[in-house]
Image (cartoon, coloured by chain):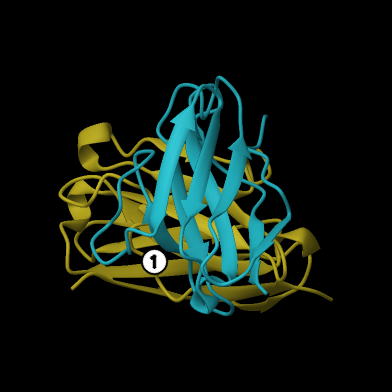
Chain colours: A yellow, B cyan
Amino acid sequence: EVQLVESGGGLVQPGGSLKLSCAASGFTFSGSHMHWVRQASGKGLEWVGRIGSKADDYALAYDASVKGRFTISRDDSKNTAYLQMNTLRTEDTAVYYCTPWGGTLPPAVGYYWGQGTLVTVSS
Amino acid sequence: QSVPTQPPSASGTPGQRLTISCSGSSANIGSRVVHWYQQLPGTAPKLLIYNNNQRPSGVPDRFSGSKSGTSASLAISGLQSEDEADYYCAAWDGSLNGYDFGTGTKVTVL
């Protein structure tokens, strides 16, 4: 059974930093891309970015709204993906989800989702 | 960036057929496969349709997807009360190397 558990969310002041984790199990983590998606309260889904697998040289891609402030990484030995968020803004307040793609998984982003972790940026 | 555009809301009575449109661009829908997600209140999204018209295991065949050019559609036949949710289309954007979610449609069953 595929499981994704996001953690690390919380309250942070504008300009601050936070690092989210996504612990994965039930699939071949090392062979999959890992995406991060966020959703502000009452708003739509917004893709944040993704990290490729080792086979893709861990290729990174980010949405323009977070590029230069957020960094995605992964530790295949721990089956965990990370989202380092720096210079946070109030508009980054959202529930953050991780979702895998590729490898032996079905061919679509968002086939599996975690429960999400809430990040609140406020003074 | 041409975010796929959806109508903000759609509604129907039980048993009706409802269609949700998703209008994109040549960079996303026009050149990539389209996926659809259903999000019930307070829950994580759920993949409803992938690769334009494929249903994951467990998704009722009341849900169907199609694509033509730079637009896509999700159809719900035999609308049921439990279909009340937000629906999002999405496609990869090759020009921006990013994943574009549609603006979302709130479906209400009257």
Q: Could you tell whether B46 is left or right of A66 in the image? A: left
Of residue B35 and residue B108, the one placed in the foreground of this image is: B108
How many numbered dots are placed on residues in this image? 1
Of residue B94 and residue A89, the one placed in the foreground of this image is: B94
Q: Quadrant of residue A2?
A: bottom left
- Whether residue A112 is situated above or below residue B98 in the rendered picture: below
Q: Residue furthest right?
A: A123
Of residue A105 and residue B4, the one placed in the foreground of this image is: B4
Q: Could you tell whether A6 is left or right of B103 in the image? A: left
The secondary structure type at the circle numbered 1 is loop
Name which residue lies at 71% across and 71% down: A41
Q: Position of residue A1 (x, y in %)?
A: 18, 73
Can residue A8 be spotted in the picture? no
Q: Position of residue B6 (x, y in %)?
A: 67, 45
Name which residue lies at 23% across and 50% down: A106
Q: Could you tell whether B19 is left or right of A89 in the image? A: left
Q: What residue did someone put label 1 on? A: A113
- For disc 1, the neighbor class at 10 Å (few under 14, some 14 to 19, many from 20) is many
Name which residue lies at 49% across and 68% down: A20
Q: Position of residue B32 (x, y in %)?
A: 42, 28
Q: Position of residue B60 (x, y in %)?
A: 33, 64
- Whether residue B31 is situated above or below residue B98 in the rendered picture: above
Amino acid carrying mark 1 in the image? Trp
Q: Quadrant of residue B84?
A: bottom right
